[in-house]
Image: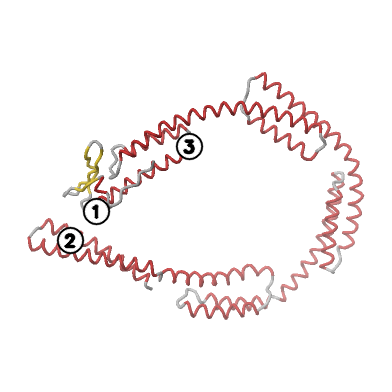
Amino acid sequence: MPVAPPTVADAPTWGRVAEDGTVYVRTADGERAVGQYPEGTAEEALTFFVRRFEALAFEVDLLEKRIATGTVATGDAEASLTKLRGEVVGANAVGDLGSLEERLTALESLIEEQRAARKAERAQRVEQARARMAQIADEAEKVAAGNDWRNGANRLRDLLEEWKGLSRQDKTSDDALWRRFSTARTTYTRRRKAHFAEQNQAREGARQIKERLVAEAEALADSTDWGPTAGKYRDLMQKWKAAGPAPKDVDDALWKRFRGAQDTFFGARDAANAALDEEFAANAEVKEALLAEAEALLPIEDIKVAKEKFRGIAERWEAAGKVPRARIKELEARIRKVEQAIRSFEDEQWRRTDPEKSARANEMVTKLETAIADVEADLAKAREAGNAKKVAELEENLASRQAFLEMARRTSQEFSG
């Protein structure tokens, strides 16, 4: 069962800090030094080594969960357990290390139980594989007796791949089941070939239909009635697909003529659309000028002014009308980029003035200022006492805290805008 890591409040239960900054952890065998933390307070020292214990406890929790869920192989679990035990035993941390060792010991039994269970599972899988082979042979014989020419071959291939992945049995059982499966596949293949031989007759009928469709397509190639004619070509394509395949060499030649007629029509339609694009070129120039106005808003200095100007630009953008199709994506991407920059700036401005974060930053400044005042008072006393060593220590401490204070003040200023 996971043990709650010690907090700063109850850390003295598991450890203490000597006057020279040495930190000790209490164990069943007595106290043991785990390190030194001469720069900070006793509370800070305990907190530092408690955090180390929390990290070890987290690793134990994680390993327990992985092993309990069976997501890790037995060998890997043992290796992880050995490694983690080496980290826990004699760890330089403050906390109930004994309970962590007990939990790791309990995991040894669980790993052995899982090893036995997996061995039984393997034996069961072998028996299940034999039963599945018999089922595959039964299903293959049913496919061989049916007339599903499109899906039957695929199903037999899938069954063959599944067969190859099954656990091997004794040779006698294997060979008998394999003969049934192989015979079914051979029977199906022969019947399928006979079926498609009959279908060749149907291909001749498909040739005649496609020849008529080609004639219709070629008759429409010079039409300028763009919308209705495009619809007729879609209908002809549907009929082409429904006709089925003609003999291979004939099918390719007919398709070349059919596609050629389509290309002629749609090429002419595209040319007509290109002419329209020329008409819209002036609209693109208007939008380019609007983009210059919009992009000039970046980088943003006054969000209110930027939003107001962009609103007017957007209204004129919509009024400018259509642009050539080749320019749509480019122009829209640029205007959206400016819009997104304005939105991001507004979001960032809100984030920087978040009252909760600002309060936390101000609180940190206040705490540091108080701590610095205390250090300065101690420093003055040490100087009066002529304690050079103490003066040096306090001066170093003061410089460090003042550096942190400067950073905290800059952060507070950022949040306050």
Q: Position of residue 295 (x, y in %)?
A: 53, 74
Which residue is painted at 61% across and 70% down in the image?
A: 332
Q: How many neighbours does mark 3 have within 10 angstroms: few (below 14), some (14-19), or many (20 or more)?
A: some
The residue identified by callout 1 is: 43
The residue identified by callout 3 is: 72
Q: Position of residue 107 (x, y in %)?
A: 40, 34
Q: Position of residue 292 (x, y in %)?
A: 56, 77
Which residue is painted at 80% across and 63% down in the image?
A: 266
Q: Earlier in the sequence, mark 1 or mark 3?
A: 1
Relative depth, front residue between 289 and 54? 54
In the rendered image, the residue lying farthest to the front is 1
Circle 2 SS class: helix
Relative depth, front residue between 341 and 287? 341
Relative depth, front residue between 134 and 11? 11
Circle 1 SS class: helix
Q: Earlier in the sequence, mark 1 or mark 2?
A: 1
The amino acid type, in three-letter code, at marker 3 is: Val
The residue identified by callout 2 is: 395
Picture quadrant of residue 198: top right
